[in-house]
Amino acid sequence: MSRPEEPARSRVDTRVDLGGIRLRNPVLTASGTFGYGSEFSPFVDLTRLGGIVAKSLTLEPRQGNPPPRIAETPAGMLNAIGLENVGVAAFVAEKLPLLPAELPVVASVFETEIDRYAEVCKRLTGVPRVAGLEINASCPHVKSGGIEFGQRPALLAELVRSARRASSLPLLVKLSPNVTDIREMARVCEAEGADALSLINTLQALDVDLATRRPVLRNGLGGLSGPAIRPVALRMVWQASQAVRIPVCGIGGIMSAADAVKFLVCGATAVQVGTANYLNPLAAVEVAEGIEAYAAAQGLARVADLIGTLEMPTDR
């Protein structure tokens, strides 16, 4: 008895290069939405992902904000987790060894002062399993009264410059959407040696519990993510990709392959799947497979051929 024929495999080349990080496909998981990766390994073949961006790391372990610190909103999610994490030493010693050797792991770096950012970058440099660093520039700078690093060009330039000096690893900068002109911030990062950009981070937001007339989150303000922010993210990815020559990684409300393809068309080289991971552990894998299927249906030899193909009206 003959064996049934296997379905024809796509010949689309799904590989992309994100600022020196070589990915088997353009889909990563977003920081803070996929733990340290190993938590999802019982449900997901991690090697089917392009890579992961792990939870943001600080010098010492961080407890985060008290609950309630997450809430559902129309077409989105509001959170103020407070960047709870195990600290850089425990990440290297305990979390990284649990991941497949062939999986590109991008370490997300967060701190409240520039010299501490640099120290985290130094400690991650030379760690064989770390493929690159993503600098979370949407964090409050204590010495500047709590303003986000990514909201002031001079402060952002100092942060990126310090991180660049501290590490030879591919350096991504995750930009804040809470700015007037994302193009200016993108140019600052490129000028200071960033290898790629990640955008957008969550939008600062607030929701209210009318029964108590208090914020739904204990912290008060939180970050809005999910499909509600996708059009904003697409606009900013397009603007940033037009402003700089370094690659852009698109983030914001990607729930399906169609959503992800929109980011590629708008100029993103890769994408990160975030909030969708809470609903479906397989979301990122399904997005990757869907991108490949779309490229094949379009008769494209490479997924990379989709990047930056948006036809914007000339009289915009």
Image: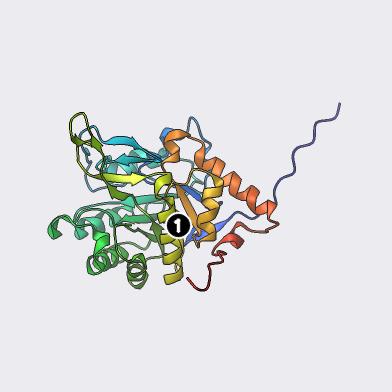
Residue in view at x 22 percent, y 41 percent: 62
Q: Position of residue 268 (x, y in %)?
A: 49, 59
Q: Is residue 207 among the parts visible in the rendering? A: yes
Give above or below for 311 relative to 297.
below
The extreme top residue here reads 1
- What colouring style does the render use? rainbow
**Relative to 227, 135 lies left or right:** left
Which residue is more in the foreground, 264 or 160? 264
Q: Position of residue 294 (x, y in %)?
A: 64, 50
**Relative to 190, 89 lies left or right:** left
**Is label 1 in a helix, a strand or a loop?**
helix
Q: Position of residue 28 (x, y in %)?
A: 47, 48
Given the image, on which type of amino acid does mark 1 rest? Leu
**Relative to 299, 253 lies left or right:** left
**Label 1 Cα crowd, 10 Å radius (few <14 / some 14-19 / many 20+):** many
Residue in view at x 64 percent, y 55 percent: 13
Residue in view at x 24 percent, y 42 percent: 82
Q: Position of residue 220 (x, y in %)?
A: 20, 41
Q: Which residue carries the number 1 mark?
A: 234
What is the quadrant of residue 40 in the picture?
A: top left
Q: Is residue 48 among the parts visible in the rendering? A: no
| Total residue callouts | 1
What is the quadrant of residue 217 in the picture?
A: top left
